Structure formats: structure tokens, C-alpha cells
């Protein structure tokens, strides 16, 4: 259960549909109607939240063990809606150097397989996870996606989370790094407004930098704010549309893939 919004409650189930996509159905049984007349309601809710996070973390460790055994670099891409995560992943595949590893993309959305289809059009393999009412991916959904399309050794697994800068910060998927994407069409103070997410991320990508002349966005300030909540965070400036910064982005990917292969 997400401690912020209560999504991902116990009344949900996940399965693989006939198209090979991972689908989660969530049922509302009124479990969000908190009756504060009962003194134990809050403690019971906290206990359920802790149990769900503990179970998620155990499955995340299984995913991490799989990635380690196959020397796979897995990344969890997080952002608010509209930052350009999918286009960035498409541009990443299109700009892939000749000696680069195979890429599997796991796409997370509440509905549709539009983004997975966009990835497949670039030539990369993709599997869609539909979360239904859920506002984030969890480790079990990723585990099911990996069972539906098992990644090869020495490859990249790029997981695009549901657009949300709150809930995904709590849920470990087994990734090596969270990569937070922010676009210049958003506010430069996003790191201060959503500190948990930027504190959890190892890399911030500022996307759509080709639009800087047309918007009021201070990239230096954004990076300063990000370092204020996470002094060790790294930053890259990229345009998925023009290709600016993709060479440095691929250099970061290759360096971390080498670490995964040690």
C-alpha cells in the first residue's frame, strides 16, 4: 500500500494477458473509508503498509539477484507526467552505439500499450505493464514482466515507471539506480517540492533542453536544488528531440553497465 495515496491495496491481482502484457486489476472494497472512532485504525493501517513494503522489498531482492546473475544493468525511470521519459527511451535506443548491449524496456502506465508500441517501433523489445488504479510499479509486476520476456545476459533493462513524483520513491523494483527525469517545461524547483524522489535518485536528466530559449527554466538552479536534497546526485542535460546530450548519456550507461558486469 502506498503510504501517500493508499493505492496498491491488498484487493488487487496481477496477471499476464493474451498479448503478453502485465495487467493489474484493483478492486475497491471500501478499505479507504477510515473510521477514526476505532482507536486501532491508524496502527492497523501502518502495519498493512509495512507488510506490503516488506513483501515488495523481498521481491525486489529477487529481481536484483536475477539482474546480478545475468550481469544486467537495470534502471528505474521516474518523473511527473509529460517529462518525455518515453521519447527519451526511444531516442536512447535510436542512438545506441554499434557495440552496445541488447535493450529490454518495461513500460508502466495505468492504461493502454501506446508507449510500449512506440518503443517497439524503434526495434527494441518492450513489455507493457498496466497498473489500473495504481500510481506506481511494484516489484512483483516487474518480476512478472521479466518472466514474460526474460532478458539476456549483459543487457540493459530500462523500466519506465508511471508518471508520478511521489509514490514510486517508496517502491524498490530491484534496479541498480533510479533516474529522475525533469523537463524544462516544468518548474526548476521540483527537487525541493518532491525531495523524497530526488533523494532516492542517483541521476537527474534535464530533458527538452532545446526549449530553454522559449521557457522560464533555470537549469543551474534546478541542479543546485537537486544537490540540496541529494548532494551526490549527478545531472545530465539532454534533448530527446535533437539528440543533444545523448552521447554523454550513453557514456553514463556504458560506465554503469561495466560496473554491473564486474
Image (spheres, rainbow, N blue to C red):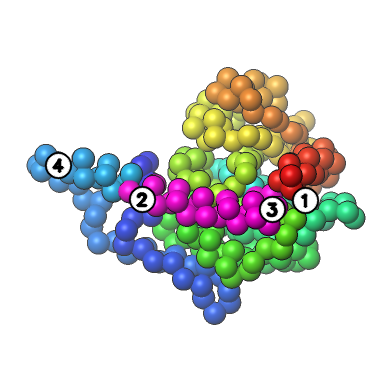
Q: Which residue matches tag 3?
A: 72
* Label 4 vs 1, first from the N-terminus: 4
How far apart in space, not on screen, are marks 4 and 1 (Cα)? 50 Å
Whether residue 238 is visible to the viewer of this picture, yes or no, is yes
Q: Which residue matches tag 4?
A: 40
Residue stretch rendered in magenta on the structure = 51-74
Q: Residues within 10 Å of mark 4 (few under 14, many from 20)?
A: few
Are the residues flagged by discs 4 and 1 in contact, CB closer than 8 Å?
no
Element carrying mark 1? helix
Q: Which residue matches tag 1?
A: 92
Q: Quadrant of the C terminus?
A: top right
Examine the rendered structure and indicate whether residue 27 appears above or below residue 7: below
Q: Nearer the viewer, mark 1 or mark 2?
A: 2
Q: Residue at x 69, y 49 (%)?
A: 73
How far apart in space, not on screen, are marks 3 and 1 (Cα)? 17 Å
Residue projecting furthest to the bottom: 18
Q: Residues within 10 Å of mark 1 (few under 14, many from 20)?
A: many
Examine the rendered structure and indicate whether residue 69 appears above or below residue 189: below
Amino acid at each position: 500500500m502506498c503510504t501517500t495515496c493508499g493505492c496498491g491495496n491488498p484487493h488487487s491481482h496481477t496477471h499476464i494477458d493474451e498479448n503478453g502484457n502485465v495487467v493489474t486489476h484493483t478492486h475497491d472494497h471500501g478499505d479507504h473509508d477510515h473510521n477514526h472512532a476505532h482507536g486501532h485504525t491508524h496502527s492497523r493501517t501502518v502495519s498493512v503498509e509495512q507488510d506490503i513494503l516488506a513483501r515488495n522489498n523481498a521481491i525486489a531482492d529477487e529481481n536484483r539477484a536475477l539482474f546480478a546473475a545475468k550481469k544486467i544493468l537495470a534502471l528505474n525511470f521516474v518523473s511527473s507526467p509529460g517529462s518525455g521519459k518515453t521519447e527519451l527511451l526511444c531516442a536512447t535506443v535510436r542512438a545506441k552505439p554499434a557495440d552496445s548491449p541488447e535493450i529490454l524496456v518495461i513500460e508502466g502506465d495505468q492504461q493502454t500499450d501506446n508507449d510500449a508500441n512506440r518503443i517497439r517501433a524503434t526495434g527494441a523489445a518492450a513489455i507493457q505493464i498496466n497498473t489500473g488504479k495504481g500510481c506506481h510499479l511494484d516489484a512483483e509486476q516487474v518480476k512478472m514482466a521479466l518472466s514474460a520476456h526474460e532478458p539476456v545476459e549483459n543487457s540493459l533493462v530500462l523500466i519506465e515507471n508511471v508518471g508520478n513524483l511521489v509514490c514510486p520513491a517508496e517502491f524498490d523494483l530491484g534496479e541498480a539506480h533510479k533516474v529522475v527525469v525533469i523537463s524544462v517545461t516544468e518548474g526548476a524547483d521540483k527537487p525541493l517540492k518532491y525531495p523524497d524522489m530526488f533523494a532516492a535518485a542517483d541521476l537527474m536528466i534535464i530533458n527538452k533542453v532545446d526549449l530553454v530559449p522559449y521557457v522560464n527554466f533555470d537549469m543551474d538552479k534546478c541542479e543546485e536544488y537537486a544537490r540540496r536534497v541529494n548532494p551526490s546526485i549527478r545531472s545530465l542535460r539532454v534533448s530527446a528531440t535533437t539528440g543533444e546530450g545523448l552521447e554523454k548519456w550513453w557514456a553514463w550507461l556504458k560506465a554503469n553497465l561495466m560496473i554491473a558486469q564486474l
